[in-house]
Amino acid sequence: MKLIFGTYLDGTSWSDEQASSGKLQLGPSGMLNFLETRLGLSRPDSHPAMRINQYLQRLQACDSPDAWFHNSLHADAWSTAKQLLAWRDQLIEAGWKGQMDKHCSARLQALGTLEQSSLPLIAGREDRLREILRMLEKCNTISVHTINIQEPFKLLPPVWQTILSRLRDMGVHLHQSLPIIRTDKTSDLAKVQSVLNNAVHKTAAIKDDESLVMAKAPDEWEAAESLALWLAADPAQHKELTIICGADTDVLDQALQRHGLPQLGGSDSSRWRASLQVLPLVMANAWKPVEVQRLIELLSLPMAPIPIAAVRHFLHALRKEPGVGGDAWKEALRHITVEQQNKLSEKGSDNAEALAEASVSMLNAYLAEDRYMPDSGIPEEVLHKRCQWIIEWLGWQAKNDPMLIEALSHAREMQKLAKGKGLIPRITLERMLDSVIGIGCTAPDRIEEAAHWKIVTHPGQITTPCKTIIWWGFIDPQLTPLTYWSKTERDALRKYSIELEDSVLARRREAEAWKRGFNQADETMLLFYPSQMHGEEVYPHPYWDEIRNAAVKGRPNMPPEILLASLLKETSTLTNKETWQLAGRRLILKKMQEPIWETPTGNFTIPADTVSPPDTLSYTKMNTLLACPMKWVLHYHSGLRVPDALSLPTDNQMIGNLCHRIVENLYSGGNKQWTPEDAEAQALKLYDSLTPAMASELLLEGRELDNSRYRRSVAKAVKQLAGAVEQLGLTVEQSEGKLQGDFVGIPFIGYADLLLHDKNGNPFVLDLKWSGSSSYRKKEIEEGSALQLASYAWMLRTTAPEAQIHSAYF
């Protein structure tokens, strides 16, 4: 068996050859599995979250007020366990066995105490590497003949240096891949490569032959179009082409498709895909107070564990009252119950009513009633039931959507993690979800199409020379910061012959992989750098600094700005001329004909019998008809409207609705007259009782000040309203009083906020408005354009033609 081993070869094909036997390309994970198989150490896989959960149990068992991790554990238990486990694994990889002494740091002492715990801990990657080393010490042979190492041996992680050294002692031949040095070629690329490899080139003249070019585009769309044009210019050369694309290729694939080229199908892993959001959103709706936006998001998911018919009613209720448990929510529950009962009856169910009520009761429990305080936590049995709800709802659909299988596995993992935890605080539950879902998954509908070129995700995966290399998305990869171990800690570990890898070594290994991939380009190296991605500024890849420096060294007599201009091409300058040219390829561009734009039409005329007369009219409908007849037709006749999920009342509209309900409740009972002080006191009580159902967002953490201000303002407004009614000698007859008139044979209906009468029995209609300013309404009255008040007065006139009618805004 012949192996090719490299730090970045995980995820690549087993061999670059069209047909081979007994040869494998392996990265660290692949080599780990290979050696375990050869040594008989294979074991079932377990989710990483299970190890964190087990380590958390160790922390809880070892916790005390004096423990180094005590405060962190009580603030965020899961994250503390996750971080300490990561540190522990780094030490285990270095050969640590839990040794510590009284002079080492508090961190090492805490880790040592945890390592000596008798509680179980599933072996991680680092434990498995040490187990392989222990087994290799007992073996004399292994069925491997040669291992070709891609990077310099001294740059490998120490544990791999030890493993490979032991394999060499067992008779395995280790070969080091040497850098390719092209001192005989005269291209700019070869000269830069020579400088990077500290080799002396025959000629140092940079001649701008475009063998090495960084194409800079203003955004990913123009970069993708430039690359697609370059590939379309000479498809016959694709057999000797390698494309590096570690990022998502959706934009590039669209450009390739337009030019009739195969798509790359690259997709970033994402935790925000709709299928993977079912579990987090179900859990997010287990807390008090209700977060209406999270509830809306759950109801809006295409695969939410809620019947579609029920979703429609719930969203409609939330549009009326952004909360749960109020009149609108209860009305939605009634509609859903009736619909489900009818549906079950049509299927011949004998107990349709009981089944429908049970189903709706369960929905109401999961969405509204069964909620828990975040600090106290959710009981593990309730969490288990919610996960089971997801599993049972999505299980039968999994065969049609591969991503649902992933979502189902997440729900099952959460059930396992919750076992034995009792009450789980919100912060712990959310950290558990983060660990279970991880980085998410790639899009299942993104598929790589057959092509002659080769695709890799990292330059370190290119193991053989190729004519041309394209590096798509040549931007800063934003490397993860490495763990800091102090000199005191490193010295303490050295007493036990434990040497932690120097962080500089890891960075050099990464830079070496960049250079190794760059060296494999034989004739052309194209780097595509979009200066903006998703509308945000990004920076070139760090290796660009190495390339520029090498180019300047290769031509010391040329001004750097002129030299670098020969390497950097702005894609925007390539498309403003008839001949498009980049890196030795040309295309003739044809100017598009100027489109003939139609003159915008200001008026649309439709046949008189197209729109049927409405069944009823109201002020709102009439106002829309006068202001914009087209909107009236589209909304009231064609039924086009903003979805309920996007029309949730908030701010002034939400408080206005709440204030209307408070006034309605004040005057809809037996007491129609209130003193200002009593009205204010009752308004405060009603505000507190109605807010969870009609303005639940004000109860969320961080909104305490807003809630307090609104509470005072609403109570003050109601007090002033009662004072005005008392001062004017008015008597309230009805709140939300129905008014009706006849307009060209069509019933004209309205609902007055307050219907009153004065001492002489004359009707008085009052319309309530919640606003930051009253000047607009005053102007309406002064100019005679207060159509809403006019419509109320007109409808009152039909029932009391001789009365002196008054109307007003408050």
Image: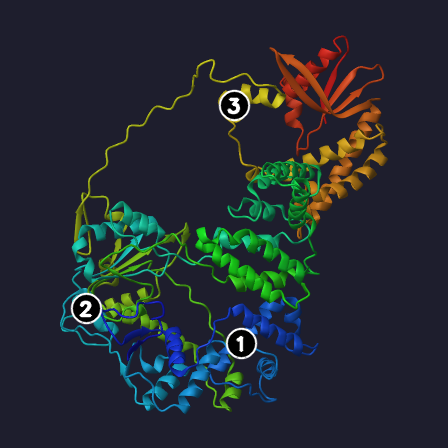
Mark 1 lies on a secondary structure that is loop
Please identify the residue farthest to the top as the structure is shown: 802
Q: In this view, does 205 lie to the left or right of 71?
A: left
Q: Residue 676 carries which label?
A: none
Q: Please tell me how crowded label 3 is: few (under 14), some (14-19), or many (20+) other residues with Cα within 10 Å.
A: some
**Is residue 419 found left or right of 46 in the rendered image?**
right
* Residue at left offset 79%, top offset 32%: 720
Residue 414 x/y as whole percent: 58, 62
The kind of residue on which mark 1 rests is Ile
Residue annotated with mark 2: 190
Label 3 vs 2, first from the N-terminus: 2
Residue 637: give its label: 3
Q: Which mark is nearer the camera, 3 or 2?
A: 3
**Colour scheme in use:** rainbow
Mark 2, other Cα within 10 Å: few <14 / some 14–19 / many ≥20: many
Residue tagged 1: 122
Q: Quadrant of residue 134?
A: bottom left
Give residue 452's quadrant in the image: bottom left
User: In the depicted view, which residue is nearer to us: 28 or 564?
Assistant: 28
Q: Residue 487's spot in the image, x, y percent?
A: 51, 83
Image position of 652 with respect to 794: above or below: below
Residue in view at x 23 percent, y 69 percent: 17
- Name the kind of residue labelled 2 in the image: Ala
Q: How far apart are marks 3 and 2 (CA)?
A: 71 Å
The local secondary structure at tag 3 comes to: helix
Give the residue drawn at x 66%, y 17%.
Answer: 791
2 or 1: tag closer to the N-terminus: 1
Disc 3 + disc 1, Cβ < 8 Å: no
Asked whether the viewer can see residue 555, the reply is: no
Q: Which amino acid does label 3 sit on?
A: His
Label 1 Cα neighbours within 10 Å, binned few <14 / some 14-19 / many ≥20: some
